[in-house]
Image (tube, grey):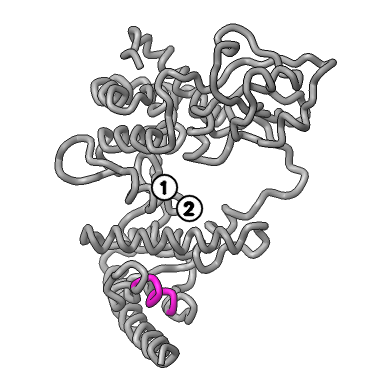
Amino acid sequence: MLQKRQTRALIACFLIAFYAMNTWATSQKHHSKKKPAKAVATAPDGPSYAQRSDAMQAADELASARDLDPAWVCQMLAQARYIPAIAKAVTPPAVGVAKNWAAYRARFIEPKRIQAGVTFWRAQRDTLLRAQQQTGVPPEIIVGIIGVETIYGQNQGNFRVLDALATLAFDFPASHPRAGERSAFFRNELGQYLSLMQHSATDPASLRGSYAGAMGMPQFMPTSWAKYAIDFDGDGKIDLFGSAADAIGSVANYFRAFGWQPGLATHYPVTFDVQKLDLPTLLVPDILPTFSVERFQAHGALLTGDALQHTGQLALIELQNGDNAPSYVAGTDNFYAITRYNWSSYYAMAVIELGQVVKQALELPTRVKQ
């Protein structure tokens, strides 16, 4: 009985998809006659998922799981298209390519982004301080995040979110070591995106974001949008694309949800006692804080100043520098919280340092006590 229902649903999806594609093709043909230059510039890149049985069956499953209109979901997925550039973007780099913190840092700590950060901070000073007062997350961390992600809204992404999520849900590169896991992740994000769009009466094909389907100034994935995005400007709606206040409040809310500790440093300087250094043991937990100050130093990682008074756990953060010696810091739980935004110590350090450099350039007075 279940199989018959699934078969009927699949047939219905194909019929809806066929109708949707014919309607889309007709509108594109008509549109191209009126504005050929714009049509060429914005035309989707790649084949449609309307003729893919797995995508059409997934439409029925996503609709059922999220209590959405099945016909609407079928129609929306029929408009999604495979984008080769997206599949290429998530393909792992060639084996043997060395990470380089100095090169990575230079991409973000650069004059254009710093100046944009100063302008953004000045314009949003009161909102940043209000977010800090409510969550404990300092302005420099929020400014660092939005600056690294989109240069304060200047580059929010050019891919249709619908295409990005469908491509990664149904065609995640098989060569990736976690292809199955990542495909399942993006299928869930696709379902959440469609749910957000239907409940807000927004056309899913209208929004653009990153190659991974992240959206708005802070580049929230659909699930993060649903869980952590907030209306911080009080206009009754959440707009991460156009409202700097909503973006600021949502980033702060995200970090509060992931355990940000007000007043705690993100990291401390570290040196090594080469006679006692047990680097393999210190690096095994990666970015997860695991060591007390005592155990940290017992394995040859030396701390000074405020770090000696640290009462929580620490992680040894290694930042490779290509052919040069790596850089190291002692990361705290707040450093780890930043990596919940993007699982990368390089990303976290870029966020921290951009925020610090912008703050220095701004020459702000002492910030609100945390």
Residue 76 falls in which quadrant of the image? bottom left
- Which residue appears at 49% of the width and 19% of the height? 265
* Residue that badge 1 annotates: 157
Q: Which element carries disc 1, helix, strand or loop?
A: loop
For image coordinates 31% across by 14% down, the residue present is 368
Q: Amino acid at mark 1?
A: Gly
> Residues at badges 1 and 2 in contact (C-beta under 8 Å)?
yes
- Residue in the picture at 58% in, 28% down: 105
Q: Pointer 2: residues within 10 angstroms few (<14), some, or many (20+)?
A: many
Residue flagged by tag 2: what amino acid is it?
Answer: Tyr
Q: SS for tag 2?
A: loop
| Residue with the most extreme right position | 275
Q: Left of 230 or right of it: where is 352?
A: right
How far across and down, in percent of the image, does residue 245 sit? 25, 33
The C terminus - image quarter: top left
What distance separates the C-alpha of mark 1 from that of mark 2? Answer: 7 Å
| First reached walking from the N terminus: tag 1 or tag 2 | 1
Q: Which mark is residue 211?
A: 2
